Amino acid sequence: MTKTQSVAFIGLGVMGGPMTGHLARAGHKVTAYNRSPERAEKWRRVWAEEGLGVAFADTPADAAKDADIAFICVGNDEDLARVTLDDDGVLATMREGTLLVDHTTVSADMARRLAEKASARSIAAVDAPVSGGEAGAVNGQLAVMCGGSEDAVERARPVMECYSKAIVHVGPSGAGQTAKMANQMCIAGILGGLSEAVRLAEAAGLDLDKTYEAISGGAAQSWQMDNRWATMTSDTFNFGFAIDWMRKDLGYALDEAKRLGLSSPVTALVDQFYADVQSSGGGRHDTSALITRLPRKISDQG
């Protein structure tokens, strides 16, 4: 049985809100903080209806002052720096020997910088971005890729297990973020091909359900195909992980590839396709809305 911990959770967004709930259900003593009071109040009501005793703090520092582990899931490098390194950030009050786990997708450079700042205060840090989207967070089925020391990851593992299906220690600080970049590059490439495949099947007048059945059992099968083929064909794009966030992630990936002297032409191209969807007002749609960039051409067959 997992030892009960006193934990802070900073960031109650699409991912962080459900993850915080799982921590409370597992019996941990949870104090939460969110920059937007309205969203904090929303989650306060949800958890109160469920009987979960989550406390709320006015600042990240207040949330973390008594925590054994401080978890963070915010937006980007700047947001992470603000809630960790500012005067009212978590590092201002965390005790020596405690643990900082960041689930935000940020740059590898930011992850390494945060680990150094934490280490200077005798606090262990783990960069632990997640994959699985809103559904994975709600259902406690996230995949977590971790960077940091083996000891820090193992200390965090039993607590993270309450919202995860897989936790992999990839390497030292920054490695978790680099693995997440690889994850996002894969998703972008797959959705680029999947969008074109759906439009081809539509234009040819194929039965889309039968086409999916025919190709999903072979080498073309993917999570995106299994979960987004039907929704892409019905123009449904409300699954939580927005194109705005994907472009942020791909920007980090392209920057890291450039730093390493690599060329990433497919990722760069799909990133520009996403920019087209953004400019058409689709930035808050799910990443599968990439297909909307391609006009639907109805076949004369039938």
Image: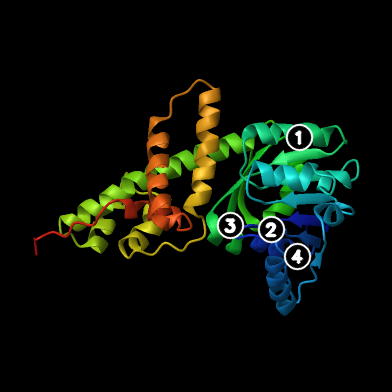
256 relative to 236, above or below? above
Is any atom of residue 172 visible in this view?
Answer: yes
- Amino acid type assigned to the residue bearing label 1 in the image: Ala
- To which quarter of the image does residue 4 belong? bottom right
Q: CA distance from mark 4 to mark 1?
A: 26 Å
Label 3 or label 2, whichever comes before in sequence order: 3
* Residue 115 tag number: 1
The residue shown at (34%, 62%) is 230
Secondary structure, mark 2, is: helix
Q: CA distance from mark 1 to mark 3?
A: 26 Å
* Residue 24 tag number: 4
Sort mark 1 into few (<14), some (14-19) or many (20+) by Cα contacts within 10 Å: many
Residue 268 in the image, given as x and y percentages of width and height: 42, 35
- Amino acid type assigned to the residue bearing label 3 in the image: Gln
Q: What residue is pinned by disc 2?
A: 162
Q: What residue is pinned by disc 3?
A: 141
Query: Are the residues flagged by discs 4 and 1 in contact, CB closer than 8 Å?
Result: no
Given residues 46 and 294, the one toward you in this image is: 294
Quadrant holding the N terminus: bottom right
Label 4 or label 3, whichever comes before in sequence order: 4
Q: Is 14 placed left or right of 92 in the picture?
A: left
Given residues 95 and 244, the one toward you in this image is: 244
In front: mark 1 or mark 3?
A: 1
Secondary structure, mark 4, is: helix
Sort mark 2 into few (<14), some (14-19) or many (20+) by Cα contacts within 10 Å: many
The residue shown at (66%, 48%) is 103
Residue 120 in the image, given as x and y percentages of width and height: 86, 32
- Amino acid type assigned to the residue bearing label 4 in the image: Ala
- Amino acid type assigned to the residue bearing label 2 in the image: Cys
- To which quarter of the image does residue 282 belong? bottom left
In front: mark 4 or mark 1?
A: 1
In front: mark 4 or mark 2?
A: 4
